Amino acid sequence: MASTEKVYIFIDNSNNWIQGKFAVGKLERLGLGSHINKRDSYYFDHLRIEYGCLIEKIQGKRILGDKPFIVGSRPPINDSMWKRFEEQGCEIKVFDRNVENREKKVDQALSRAAYKKIHFKEPAILALVAGDGDYHPMIEEALEYGMSRELKSDAFYMPLDDCYKYIAYGDGLCSVDEVLTLEVTGDSLINWTDKM
């Protein structure tokens, strides 16, 4: 029987980030018709995920069974995200994309890390944060070995739609059509500064 006091967290950053752009775009009705978007659906290109909040949300009041495992494609050279993950105590694996700019090895690395926990650690909750359904064999293995499953995935089981505002935010420039301005005229500004 798996411990419900302890949780092992595995995060597929690449899938989360890509699928999150579609999920948040749809929830907020942002970015319809992006040139990157081949699905012809909402797509929020400026999505950023706050992984500290994501891990906190998944962990809840449980004890981490081990360092959270985060895997993804190599970021741009000036990106400090992965270094911050390591500083915060996460286990990190990054891989280069292939010549066709596709990610390879990410799913396998996450599955391999999870298999190690399944076979060599005490049974507990296995929390998988992924944007696709490529992990079914690993999940079946976890259940056979007494792990409980807790999946946070857009593809199946339990989406993160109800907490996306806690774990994600946007950045970047808006188009001129989307910029909102506040216009202050007359004595309003003078009166406002006098009250400070």
Image: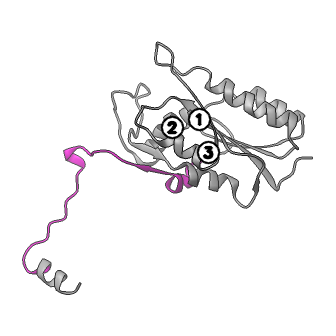
User: Which percent across, then down, holds residue 32?
Assistant: 35, 37
The amino acid type found where label 3 is placed reads Pro
139 relative to 188, above or below:
above
- The answer to whether residue 83 is magenta is no
Residue placed under numbered mark 3 in the picture? 159
Where disc 2 sits, the SS reads helix
For the C terminus, the quadrant is bottom left
Q: Residues within 10 Å of mark 2 (few under 14, many from 20)?
A: some
**Badge 3: few (under 14), some or many (20 or more) residues near its Cα, within 10 Å?**
some
78 on left or right of 63: left
Query: What whole-number distance in Å separates the C-alpha atoms at marks 1 and 2?
Result: 8 Å
Q: Nearer the viewer, mark 1 or mark 2?
A: 2
| Rendered image quadrant of residue 91 | top right
Q: Report the residue at 21% width, 87% height from top.
A: 195
Residue tagged 2: 17
Image point (77%, 29%), residue name: 138
Residue 131, labelled with which disc?
1
Q: Residue at x 43, y 43 (%)?
A: 47
Residue 152 % position (x, y): 65, 43
Part of the protein shown in magenta: 159-188
Q: Residue furthest left?
A: 186
What is the image's colouring?
one colour
Q: Please name which of the two marks, 3 or 1, marks the residue nearer to the observer.
A: 1
Q: Are marks 1 and 2 in contact (CB under 8 Å)?
A: yes
